[in-house]
Amino acid sequence: MNAKSWVLITGSAHRLGREIALAFAKAGWSVLCHYRTSKDSAQRTQQEVQDAGADCLLVDIDLAQGNAAELLMDQCVQLTGQPPQCIINNASIFEADGAPSATAEGLQKHFQVNTATPLLLANALYNRLREVTDVPHGAHCVIHVLDQKVHNLNPDYFSYTVSKLALERSVALQAQALAPTVRVCGLSPGLMYLSGPQTQANFDKASLVNLVQKRIDPADVAQGALFMAQNASINGCTLRTDNGQHLIPLSRDVMWAIEEAAN
Ligand SMILES: NC(=O)c1ccc[n+]([C@@H]2O[C@H](COP(=O)([O-])OP(=O)(O)OC[C@H]3O[C@@H](n4cnc5c(N)ncnc54)[C@H](OP(=O)(O)O)[C@@H]3O)[C@@H](O)[C@H]2O)c1
């Protein structure tokens, strides 16, 4: 691989984004580590990536802004002199609501960060590459991080789920529209980390609710992203890295299903 193949990973200060950064770094990629509020964690991830022998630069943008995608692409090109070869749209917000309690503000906030900015970031990459001649077909890739929820529906976390469903439906559409310049893929993890109002005791049980009955290893999920980025034959499809969690239907989010089973 070219020593200066840059991957931009949004929200990579910690948790899954950090794992993806380390996986790409160990495979020889240079990393653009994006963060918004977690500067200290981003600097620690930067150090870990550098310790793995890779370049790492930090970029800092609020993805809730309407023009975030263009601003972020500008920053990346200014820092590295080229558009990234791969973008991992990992950053997201995940706030609890239900279908009857959803608000315009909540729906729009989730849609902006989880759907619109990732799609526009893919477009920004496509538009930059169209200005360059001799872009090798298949080399550039955008991976939208989704959630097993979109393959295993229940109405909890309603605004979040709707935002990820729209992103999932867009994978094939964008792959068709941005071909042959940019490949577009999806990655659907299952429950990996304690989030929101979940307790540790609840997480310990909920994280085993998958076909393998083991906690999903985020490092395996990160390898899924790396595999799709490096395999030019994969386009327009979604890889489910969830220990088969999507094959266990629940009428509520697994967190609430565990709570209800305990009562
Ligand atoms: N956690 C799970 O178990 C799980 C399960 C299934 C799918 N997923 C998906 O996997 C991905 C990673 O999950 P995660 O739990 O590791 O993510 P996370 O920790 O909830 O969020 C990742 C980062 O997103 C960034 N972010 C949020 N709003 C932002 C904004 N307005 N502008 C810029 N950055 C923003 C935050 O950056 P700062 O901290 O720097 O502000 C945060 O660190 C997400 O797409 C998620 O939907 C996660």
Image (tube, helix red, strand yellow):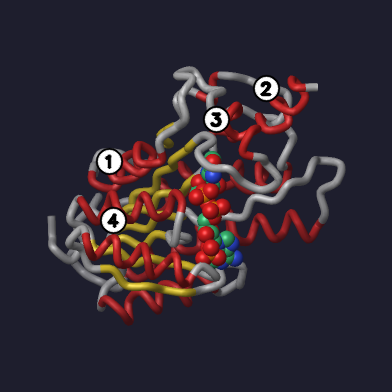
Q: Considering only order in the chain, which callout, 3 or 2, is on the residue closer to the N terminus?
A: 3
Question: Where is residue 214 drawn, in percent x and y?
Answer: 46, 24
Q: Amino acid at mark 1?
A: Phe
The secondary element bearing badge 1 is classed as helix
Task: Please report the residue visible at 63 percent of the width from the left and 33 percent of the height from the top.
Answer: 201
Q: CA distance from mark 4 to mark 1?
A: 13 Å
Provide the residue designation for mark 3. Answer: 207
Residue 209 vs 182, above or below: the answer is above
Task: Please report the residue visible at 75 percent of the width from the left and 56 percent of the height from the top.
Answer: 106
Q: CA distance from mark 2 to mark 1?
A: 30 Å
Q: Closer to the camera: disc 2 or disc 3?
A: 3
Decide: marks 4, 1 in contact (CB < 8 A)?
A: no
Is the residue marked by circle 4 packed among few (<14), some (14-19), or many (20+) residues within 10 Å?
many
Q: Closer to the camera: disc 2 or disc 1?
A: 2
Quadrant field for ligand 1:
bottom right
Q: Considering only order in the chain, which callout, 4 or 3, is on the residue closer to the N terminus?
A: 4
Q: Amino acid at mark 4?
A: His
